[in-house]
Amino acid sequence: MEGYGPASYGDAIADVYDQWYGDLSNTDDAVDALAGLTPPGARVLELGIGTGRLALPLTVRGIEVWGIDTSQAMVDLLRTKPRGEGIRVAVGDMAALDLSTIGGDVEPRFGLVFVAINTFFNLTTAEAQQRCLERVRDVLEPGGRFVLEAFVPDVDRPTNVVEARTVAIDHVILTATRHDPTEQTVTAQFIELSESGIRMRPLVIRYAPVAELDAMASTAGLELVERWSDWKGSAFTADAGVHVSVYAPT
């Protein structure tokens, strides 16, 4: 998508992000699982911290959470929420994972790094995904954990789809997607139609099957230690639509 950059999705969707995704049913389970994986006294880093859906309840539990996000608009919304001002957040690309603006000259280390709700796939090339995993390995403490939640790709999904996401009295939101199975990309537009005009919210993702993620992680110095089909720790099966994968430094 011409003109699309790392911050394009977050900047475009920030104003409706909490409305669309703020009340996901698995949030409490995710917070429980992440808190359970955090070593006592360790810092936690969230990749794609957004408006704080997971980071804020983790801080309520006394966990020191840091974050990185490409979108200043998303971070600005985080700052408006209780405890949001106290979270250290770097605005930048998680592929580079540059924390120098919040960590100083000595690069911080974390007992847990995580990326949730398909955010890893917002890195739109395999090279960017590989660089991100290598940087995650750099900032993990010995014995630390990296957790990645994402959908399991369906290679048979339709190539081009337009469907109604929302149909209301005063507006309609359409989702138009184009799937390229060769490049493993999905290009999408959320198109909001209302009396006041048309609003476009673009999204580009580059998905990867679990086997490819494991291979990239291995190259980065990370090995799979657990994989679940949800945040409750249910066994991962061949027909699972989502995976929560836990990696450790090798």
Image (cartoon, grey):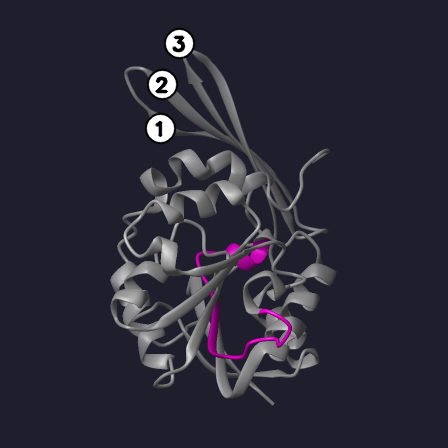
> In which quadrant is the C terminus drawn?
bottom right
* Residue at left offset 43%, top offset 73%: 44
Q: Which mark is residue 171?
A: 2
Task: Label 1, secondary structure: give it.
Answer: strand
Question: Which residue in the protein does label 1 denote?
Answer: 166
Give the Cα distance between marks 2 and 1. Answer: 8 Å
Q: Are marks 2 and 1 in contact (CB under 8 Å)?
A: yes
**184 to 130, vertically: above or below:** above
Ranked by sequence position, the earlier of labels 3 and 2 is 2
Q: Quadrant of residue 93?
A: bottom right
The residue lying toward the viewer, choosing from 138 and 208, is 138
**189 to 55, vertically: above or below:** above
What are the residue bounds of the magenta stretch?
104-121
* Residue at left offset 35%, top offset 54%: 84
Question: Which residue in the protein does label 3 denote?
Answer: 195
Q: Position of residue 198 (x, y in %)?
A: 49, 17
* Residue at left offset 41%, top offset 81%: 42
Q: Is residue 103 magenta?
A: no
Q: Position of residue 1 (x, y in %)?
A: 69, 36
